[in-house]
Image (cartoon, rainbow, N blue to C red):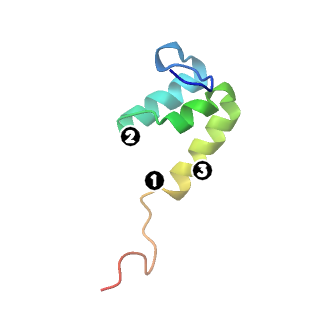
Amino acid sequence: MFRIESVAEDAAEGSVKAIYDELRDSMGIVPNVLKVLSLWPEGLELYTALVKTTMLANTARSGAGPTP
């Protein structure tokens, strides 16, 4: 049980449901820290876009990767 309210996965609708589904498909779970943002769908959309851009993007960067 959460002390902070959030939209439960089985009660999600609209953009929140779409984001939950995408997170579940890519990560296997919907992290609790992201569920907290579900009460502010615009914030959830912005934050997940940021995470996808900065952490989950498979981009080839010159010089990126471990040092030999």
Residue visible at 66% across and 29% down in the picture: 41
Residue visible at 65% across and 42% down in the picture: 46
Residue visible at 57% across and 16% down in the picture: 13
> Split into 4 quadrants, where in the image is the C terminus?
bottom left
Q: State which quadrant residue 48 falls in.
A: top right
- Which residue has dot 1 on it? 56
Q: Amino acid at mark 3?
A: Leu
Q: Position of residue 50 (x, y in %)?
A: 60, 50
Q: Which residue is farthest left?
A: 68
- Which residue has dot 3 on it? 50
Q: In terms of depth relative to the viewer, which is nearer, 15 or 37?
A: 37
Q: Position of residue 51 (x, y in %)?
A: 54, 50
Q: Position of residue 15 (x, y in %)?
A: 59, 25
| Side of 27 where 8 appears, left or right | right
Mark 1 Cα-neighbour bin, 10 Å: few <14, some 14–19, many ≥20: few
Q: Secondary structure at mark 3?
A: helix
Q: Amino acid at mark 1?
A: Leu
Q: Is residue 59 above or below residue 11?
A: below
Q: Earlier along the polypeptide chain: callout 3 or callout 1?
A: 3
The numbered disc on residue 26 is: 2
